[in-house]
Image: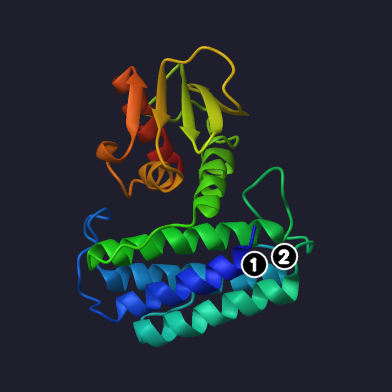
């Protein structure tokens, strides 16, 4: 996967569209403007520059960024994260939130997906949405299902959506089967086993629906629609 290539292109596009107006409302992030998105992404970038440098979470965090010009800060930060990733390579030990990957390679992938989702936010704000690379979207479906949803976050049963069901997602010939209850989420590659509901669609549409950037009109649902909505709620909890 060409993560750095996607990061460069999508971060440039995000900045380009943001310049059309920082005050525009972001449709799928209630209360946020393009300026909020820009400053959020800039802070994520500079945080990950420090994580890559230290191999650990920076503490204390965050510094006071309030006096920085949004566009200039964002431009500086997007160049800094690319430089930091290139310097780290893909094998440097690093703090991550993925129990299966404690290397800088995790941040190549995470920053590419952080960027494309927020690129969509500013494009939606200005009604100039462009497609997501299908290969990147498929990879993003895989990433949001694990570790974002399927990590070890649920042992205490702290969820408003206990589910106790199985759901399948399918896009471009790939399938993921998610089996969830109140205290666990198990993400399995493939289409084996019975499920209560299935979601299908083009890779980009399924990806954006998972991240709350597209509604149910963008996908096809078979089976129990309530299970699908509860699954989407559980994912929203995991990605906050």
One can see residue 61 in this view: no
| Percent coordinates x, y for residue 85 in the rendering | 67, 71
| Percent coordinates x, y for residue 218 in the rendering | 30, 41
Q: Mark on residue 51?
A: 1
Residue found at x 52% / y 26%: 178
Residue extending farthest front: 173
| Percent coordinates x, y for residue 82 in the rendering | 61, 75
Q: In this view, does 233 lie to the left or right of 12?
A: left
Q: In this view, does 178 lie to the left or right of 109?
A: left
Q: Is residue 230 above or below residue 81?
A: above
Pointer 1 with pointer 2, Cβ within 8 A: yes
10 Å crowding of disc 2: few (<14), some (14-19), many (20+): some
Which one is in front, 160 or 220?
A: 220
| Percent coordinates x, y for residue 118 in the rendering | 39, 62
Residue occupied by mark 2: 55
Q: Quadrant of residue 128?
A: bottom left
Q: In which quarter of the image is residue 163?
A: top left
Q: In this view, does 87 lie above or below 145?
A: below
């Amino acid at each position: 996967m060409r993560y750095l290539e996607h990061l460069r292109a999508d971060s440039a596009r995000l900045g380009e569209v943001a310049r059309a107006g920082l005050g525009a409302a972001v449709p799928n992030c209630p209360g946020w403007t393009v300026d909020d998105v820009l400053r959020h992404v800039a802070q994520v970038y500079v945080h990950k520059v420090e994580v890559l440098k230290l191999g650990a979470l920076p503490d204390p965090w965050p510094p006071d960024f309030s006096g920085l010009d949004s566009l200039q800060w964002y431009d500086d930060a997007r160049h800094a994260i690319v430089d930091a990733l290139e310097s780290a390579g893909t094998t440097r030990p690093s703090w991550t939130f993925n129990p299966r990957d404690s290397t800088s390679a995790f941040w190549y992938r995470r920053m590419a997906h952080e960027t494309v989702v927020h690129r969509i936010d500013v494009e939606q704000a200005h009604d100039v949405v462009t497609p997501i690379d299908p290969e990147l979207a498929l990879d993003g479906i895989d990433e949001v299902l694990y570790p974002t949803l399927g990590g070890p976050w649920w042992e205490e049963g702290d969820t408003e959506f206990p589910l106790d069901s199985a759901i399948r997602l399918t896009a471009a010939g790939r399938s993921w089967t998610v089996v969830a209850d109140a205290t666990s989420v198990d993400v399995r590659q493939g289409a084996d086993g019975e499920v209560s509901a299935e979601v299908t669609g083009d890779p980009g549409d399924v990806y954006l629906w998972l991240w709350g950037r597209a509604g149910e009109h963008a996908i096809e649902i078979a089976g129990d629609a309530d299970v699908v909505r509860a699954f989407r709620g559980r994912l929203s909890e995991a990605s906050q």
